[in-house]
Amino acid sequence: MCIKPGAVQGEAVEEHESGITPESQEGEGREPESKFDPITNQEEFDKRLAQRLGRERAKFSDYDALKAKAAKLDEIEAANKSELQKLSERADAAEKRAEKAELESLRAAVASEKGVPASSLIGRTREELEAGADELIAWRDKNAPPPKKVTTATSGGGLKSGAAANGGTALSPKAHAAEQLRRMRAGN
C-alpha cells in the first residue's frame, strides 16, 4: 500500500503491482461503495485490510481444486494423444503394407505377361514396370548366345541314344567288336 500522488492528505489508496487500483476494479463485477470513509485509526485499517484479504482469498478459494482438475485434464489429453499417435502409426503401417502388396501383385502380373522374372522389375507404376520389362527383353534378345548348330557327324548320325544304325537293337560293345572283326575278315 502506498500514498497515491494527488491524494488527499491522510487518504491511503491501495495500488497493486499491475497498477490497477481497487477503484478501477470496482466496475469489474463489484458494486462500488456509495461513499468513501477515510481510515482514521489502526483498528479501522486492520478491519478493512482483513475484509480486503477475505475478498481476495474468496476469489482463489477453489484454486487448488482447479489446479488438480487442470492437471488431470492434461494427463487425460496426454493419454489420448498417445492413443491417437498409436492409432495413427498403426494406420500408417497398414497403408504401407497394402501399398507393398499392391506393388508386388502388379509386379507379378507384369512379369507374367512379359515372361520375365518379377524380381528383375523395378518401378512403382504399371507403366514403369512394363518399360523395365521391355528393356530387359531387349537386352536378353541382344545378348542371347547364337543357337548351336547340330551336325549329324557330331551327334551320332541323328540317332537317339541306344538306337542302332541298322534299325535293330544296339549291340553290346563285345558283340559290336565281334561284328566288326567278321566284316574285316570278310572284306567288307
Image: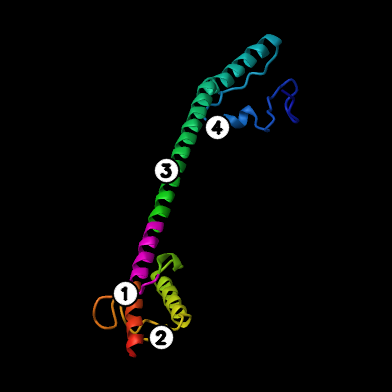
Separation of disc 4 and disc 2 at Cα?
111 Å
Label 1 environment density (alpha carbons within 10 Å; few <14, some 14–19, many ≥20):
few
Determine contact: label 3, label 4, CB under 8 Å.
Answer: no
Image quarter of residue 100 = bottom left
Disc 2 marks a residue whose amino acid type is Lys
Q: Looking at the rendered structure, which numbered label has been put on residue 63?
A: none
Disc 1 secondary structure class: helix
Q: What mark, if any, has residue 27 been given in the picture?
A: 4
* Numbered range of the magenta stretch: 100-116
Disc 3: which residue: 87
Q: Quadrant of residue 55?
A: top right
Q: Mark 2 packing: few (<14 Cα in 10 Å), some, or many (20+)?
A: few
Which residue corresponds to the image point at 62% horizontal and 14% vertical from the top-left?
Answer: 50
Amino acid type of the residue that numbered disc 3 sits on in the rendered structure: Leu
Q: CA distance from mark 2 to mark 1?
A: 33 Å
Residues at circles 3 and 1 in contact by the CB criterion of under 8 Å: no
- Closest to the camera, between mark 3 and mark 2, is 2
First in sequence: mark 3 or mark 1? 3
Q: Which mark lies nearer to you, 3 or 1?
A: 1
Taking depth in this image into account, of 138 and 154 the one nearest to the observer is 154
Badge 2 is on which residue? 149
115 within the magenta span: yes
